[in-house]
Image (cartoon, helix red, strand yellow):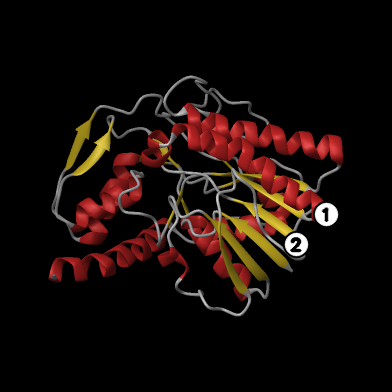
Amino acid sequence: MRTVVTGGAGFVGSHLCERLLRSGDRVVCVDNLVTGSRDNLEAFDGHPAFEFVEADVTEGVPVRGPVDRVLHLACPASPRHYLGMPTRTLLTGSLGTQHALELAMRHGARFLLASTSEVYGDPLVHPQPETYWGNVNPIGPRSVYDEAKRYAEAWTSACRREFGADTVIARIFNTYGPRMRADDGRMIPAFVGQALAGEPLTVHGDGTQTRSVCYVDDTVRGLIALAGSDLAGPVNIGNPQELPVRQLAGEILELTGSTARLTYVEAAEDDPRRRCPDIEVARTRLGWRPLVGLREGLARTVDWFAARTAPALAD
């Protein structure tokens, strides 16, 4: 197959491109490199089946030739980025999704929208099934990301109903692993970076709020299984192991051997208290579940960051 991956130079997108290439696909990565990086592509840049197109999906998706699948991941995804680029984030969810869907529909291609657990907001139902409509503040600072993805889901669903587009929606829960940006403001890279530097780990709120984190290899397996299915979704892709934030911080301190302490600061506005996916649909319809345990996934992530931190410290 020839698969287009928008946002393919980003954290999850680059892992997705790599796995698709290993499975024998021809891959076209489309990215404007605003939050993605060519460094994420160096493991397979130059591969004969890989093509990189630098483009902003809000202006179009300029891909020539046949297209069998479009996997739409383009969007600022970390708090630091979407809070710093609020209108760009909204445009990516609206115009960017429209352009990516138009490309898929022109070719009769399968379209996968990478949505997010953020559509559930600060949920009042636990764990969150796909049938839950969410508890979202539509005008809060986080709304630019939440509503961008909610709109993208609505647009995708409308094109399926009105035009018969072959679409599926994935709702991705917190994903972590190598190639995350150390400065993107997300919890795990922030904790790892602070622990490796011997600095106190900054916990927003009292640390009892929970997250369910999924290693990137498992997330990518889920997305590929979903793209290859006949499901329309939405389908939750995440790890149902729910952990307090301060426990995650403690695991990272132990893995890094850091003696630093936790420091508590005010919680971010609209920060959800609990987040945990109901993955029954993915289990029963896709045969998918996470395979990488928390300790193993965090160890791989710490090793990746440590390898990149050591040369900087030596300089």
Under circle 1, the secondary element is loop
Q: Is residue 244 above or below residue 192?
A: above
Residue in the image at 33% along x and 33% along y: 208
Quadrant in the rendering for residue 116:
top right
- Residue 203 position, x and y percent, is 26, 37
Disc 2 residue crowd, few under 14, some 14–19, many 20+, Cα 10 Å:
many
What label does residue 9 carry, if any?
none
Residue in the image at 58% along x and 26% along y: 134
Residue in the image at 18% along x and 38% along y: 263
Disc 1 residue crowd, few under 14, some 14–19, many 20+, Cα 10 Å:
some
| Residue nearest the observer in this picture, 221 or 90 | 90
**Dot 1 and dot 2 residues touching (CB under 8 Å):** no
Amino acid marked by disc 2: Val
Quadrant in the rendering for residue 54:
bottom right
Q: Earlier in the sequence, mark 1 or mark 2?
A: 2
Please state the total of marks drawn on the protein image.
2
Is residue 271 in view? yes
| Residue nearest the observer in this picture, 78 or 262 | 78
| Residue nearest the observer in this picture, 33 or 168 | 33
- Residue 136 position, x and y percent, is 52, 23
Under circle 2, the secondary element is loop
Amino acid marked by disc 1: Gly
Q: Disc 1 designates what residue?
A: 108
User: Looking at the rendering, in which quadrant would you find the N terminus?
Assistant: bottom right
Is residue 126 in view? no
State the CA–CA distance, disc 1 to disc 2. Answer: 8 Å
Residue in the image at 61% along x and 80% along y: 48
Q: Is residue 129 left or right of residue 239?
A: right
User: Looking at the rendering, in which quadrant would you find the C terminus?
Assistant: bottom left
Q: Disc 2 designates what residue?
A: 67
